[in-house]
Image: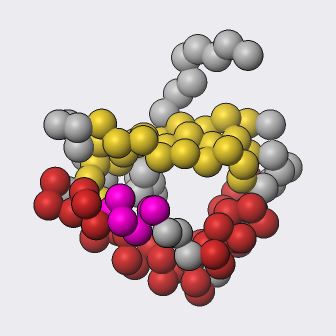
């Protein structure tokens, strides 16, 4: 199992919309998340900095393949098209990233 944390900005004027969307995530999107071996997925909001922090556990053996599977899913693409206008990617993210990956520096089980 691999623990993954990522961060992205959220536009202040879209915070309530983002919360509303995530209070009722489409069932097809949730099913695809599970099909791609992701468990215990959470998104946290930090105000007033307006940052979203996501955490999930990846339980598969081909992370890149599972992420490609998710990205190719039409319903997931539709969901992203709704959510992405709310988000503000960090200028410091790596090339090809939307959500910026983070290094795990501590874990206690």
Q: Residue furthest bottom?
A: 74
| Residue 73 point in image, percent of width and height | 64, 81
The reply to whether residue 53 is visible in this rendering is: yes
**Which residue occupies 68% across, 63% down?**
33
| Residue 88 point in image, percent of width and height | 26, 56
| Residue 14 point in image, percent of width and height | 21, 63
Q: Is residue 64 magenta?
A: no
> Is 36 or 45 nearer to us in this picture?
45
> Is 62 or 9 nearer to us in this picture?
9
**Which residue occupies 55% across, 45% down?**
42
**Horizontal arrangement in the rendering, residue 22 relative to residue 49 (left or right):** right
Colouring chosen for the image of the structure: secondary structure
Quadrant hosting residue 18:
bottom left
Against 49, residue 35 (above or below) is below
**Horizontal arrangement in the rendering, residue 12 relative to residue 60 (left or right):** left
**Horizontal arrangement in the rendering, residue 83 relative to residue 70 (left or right):** left
The region drawn magenta spans 18-23
Main SS of the magenta part reads helix
Quarter of the picture containing the N terminus is top right
| Residue 78 point in image, percent of width and height | 48, 83
**Which residue occupies 30% across, 36% down?**
46
**Which residue occupies 78% across, 66% down?**
35
The reply to whether residue 94 is visible in this rendering is: no
Q: How many numbered discs? A: 0
Quarter of the picture containing the C terminus is top right
> Is 49 or 61 nearer to us in this picture?
49
């Amino acid at each position: 199992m691999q623990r993954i944390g990522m961060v992205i900005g959220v536009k202040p004027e879209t915070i309530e919309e983002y919360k509303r969307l995530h209070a009722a995530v489409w069932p097809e999107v949730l099913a695809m998340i599970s099909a791609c071996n992701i468990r215990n997925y959470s998104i946290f909001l930090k105000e007033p900095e307006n940052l979203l922090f996501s955490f999930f556990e990846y339980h598969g053996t081909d992370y890149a393949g599972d992420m490609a599977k998710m990205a190719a899913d039409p319903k997931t693409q539709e969901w992203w098209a709704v959510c992405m206008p709310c988000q503000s990617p960090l200028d410091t993210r790596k090339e090809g990233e939307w959500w910026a990956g983070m290094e795990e520096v501590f874990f206690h089980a």
